[in-house]
Amino acid sequence: MRLLIIEDDRDAADYLVKAFREVGHVADHAIDGEEGLAMALGEQYDVLIIDRMLPKRDGLSVIGTLRAKSIETPALILSALGQVDDRVKGLRAGGDDYLPKPYSFSELLARVEVLARRRSGRSEETVYRVADLELDRLSHRVTRGESEIVLQPREFRLLEYLMKHAGQVVTRTMLLENVWDYHFDPQTNVIDVHMSRLRAKIDKGFARALLHTVRGAGYVIRDGK
Amino acid sequence: MASDSAAFDALKRATKEGLTALGKLLRTTLFKLSLVYLTVFALFAAFLIGYFAWTTSSLITQQITETIDAEINGLSELYNQGGIRRLLLLVDARSRRPGSNLYLVTTPAGEGLAGNVGTLQPGILERTGLTETSYRRLDEAEDAEHYALVRVVRLGGGFRLLVGRDVEERERLHDIILTAARWSVAVVVVLGLVGGIFVTRRVLKRIDAMTGTTRTIMEGDLGGRLPIAGTGDELDRLAANLNAMLERIEALMHGVKEVSDNIAHDLRTPLTRLRNRAEEALRTARGDGDYRAALENVLEESDGLIRTFNALLMIARAESGEIRENMDEFDAAEIVHDVAELYEPLADDKGLALKVDAPGPARVKGNRELISQTLANLIDNAIKYAAPKHAAPALAPAAGDALPDALPSGDNATAIVVSAATDGHRVLLSVADNGPGIPAADRSRVVERFVRLEQSRSQPGAGLGLSLAAAVARLHRGELVLGDNAPGLKATLVLPRV
């Protein structure tokens, strides 16, 4: 995966470039808005990571210009202004995701990977499959092997989101944002409790576990380890 | 020489100061306004006098015309009855009277037969209507010239008769009125200017006093207040309003100071802990495992710090009221269901029964995210403090508690009740638990701006929930009410209903 990081803090950018390289991605760095815009226009990237406040050209303006030229590369906005209305502004300006600073790298990585693969079009499928687990989005039926699994509406949406991003790590915050549409920190491990309930329903009694906890990051649903 | 130039400088400065003072006076709105009024009044005076002059003059003209017409009629009659001789005799007699009108009888050729007119403007005799002309009397010197209104009629036999009257009287009146006009306009201008300067100076003095006070306030003395003259006029009202504003600013500044003190305290403690952990690891760690554990600790600690920081920031933002722009209408009962659903498994895991009583609808106008977060914080607190169901003491139904969300008596399995209800113009969102509660004496204090109980202060993040709830309530022009759930705490978010 090829990334462009537009960030004026050189230390933060170096850290990100290095961290992404360690997990096997290529990341370029632009130091200001103008350079970032030029690079995003000139090269092919899978995801753009854009700081909100940049010298020469504001992050939102970079995204706006790209979108005006119909360059739809997914963009994740990093912002030190971690407030509700700021996030709304960022998404309205054409950003695809928003992460307030300070963030953990695992959170950023999970979000970037989801963004990069978003275009592969899984959302059009009506039935999601992971090993012998099946989720029918139209009839709202979930089966594993021969047996039907009865889920609460919220559990269904949780599983739907996980299976939509099967094989990818999703963080607790991503689940809270996408399944519950909450953008605040719930303080306690509420998501973990929901996940353990879901796990009890889809994995209990089966030889192979599909729902895995990724330590320090979040959850992933996949076939095998 | 040196003293001379110093004196000159002083004089120059004084002149300049005088000039700037005058300039300041001239630039005031009040003075400009007086100038406008002055112009209007001067124009009005001029118009009034002009109108007066015009009507008087036309009245006089009319009188003259009537006299002339009467005489011409009389003389014509005489001529018709008595012929030219009688006419000439009478005209001659009348011409000799002092202050008499003007008379002239001529032959068809234009030769004067009788009368007191010496010369006329040429061609006057040919015109028969009423005309104004210059003339000279017979007995006057060459250079004397007057103006008169005359009328000429042709008599039978080609004779012409002219009767006229001097208009000098009218002209004199004109002059008098003109002089009066000049004087009155001059007086209006002078009085207006003096009055304007006087009033402006008075007001300017008070404005200057206000400006002086505001300057000292801007320089940092927030305790200063604008002087109020006690006359109850518009300046007094302005000063009173500005004073009220200053009062509010002072309170806000006080709040900001408190916030920064709180931030300092709330962040300093975990920062110290963070630093200690790192230092300890450097000093005592024996190998990778120890370092890893220490780093994980540090990460956890910094996450806690971020959480506290976010909560403080959120409270400050709610307090500042700037989120008020991002508000829409929604059903709070739905939110109660949603948030309770998020926490229900957590409560269940802890052996607590969480019951929702929100039949809805309870429509409010507000920030959905903040109200959700507030409810989440309250429920989170309740779960932390509520007693598990097997240990729950028998709940006595609270006497007089008629609200629909009262714990159902006999159901001691329900540890937490989350409810939404409407009460007149209010929407009540409450979270009740059966934990230790908050002592009555502390309840009102805890809702105050940024006040946290000492017990909770030492715990990172915790305890800010109630402060945030109170701030969110204030943001929505509502309040957070903490009540006794006997036992336990019942926190109610009171919001205006739409």
Image (cartoon, coloured by chain):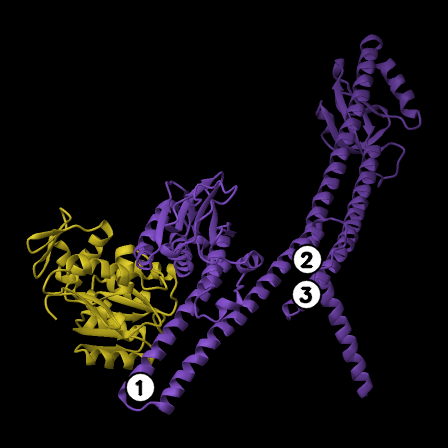
Q: Foreground: B378 or B495?
A: B378
- Give the camera-side residue of B135 and A141: A141
Q: Residue at x 20, y 81 (%)?
A: A22
Q: Which mark is residue B223?
A: 3
Q: Quick one: label 1, few (<14), some, or many (20+) residues within 10 Å?
A: some
Q: Is residue B330 visible?
A: no
- How far across and down, in percent of the image, does residue A215 sit? 24, 72
Q: What's the amino acid at mark 2?
A: Thr
Residue that numbered label 1 is attached to: B291
| Colour of chain A in the rendered structure image | yellow
Please determine if labels 2 and 3 lie on a single subunit: yes
- Locate residue B407: give its quadrant: top left
Which amino acid, by three-letter code, is at mark 1?
Tyr
Q: Which chain is purple?
A: B
* Kind of element beneath mark 3: loop
Quadrant, the N terminus of chain B: bottom right
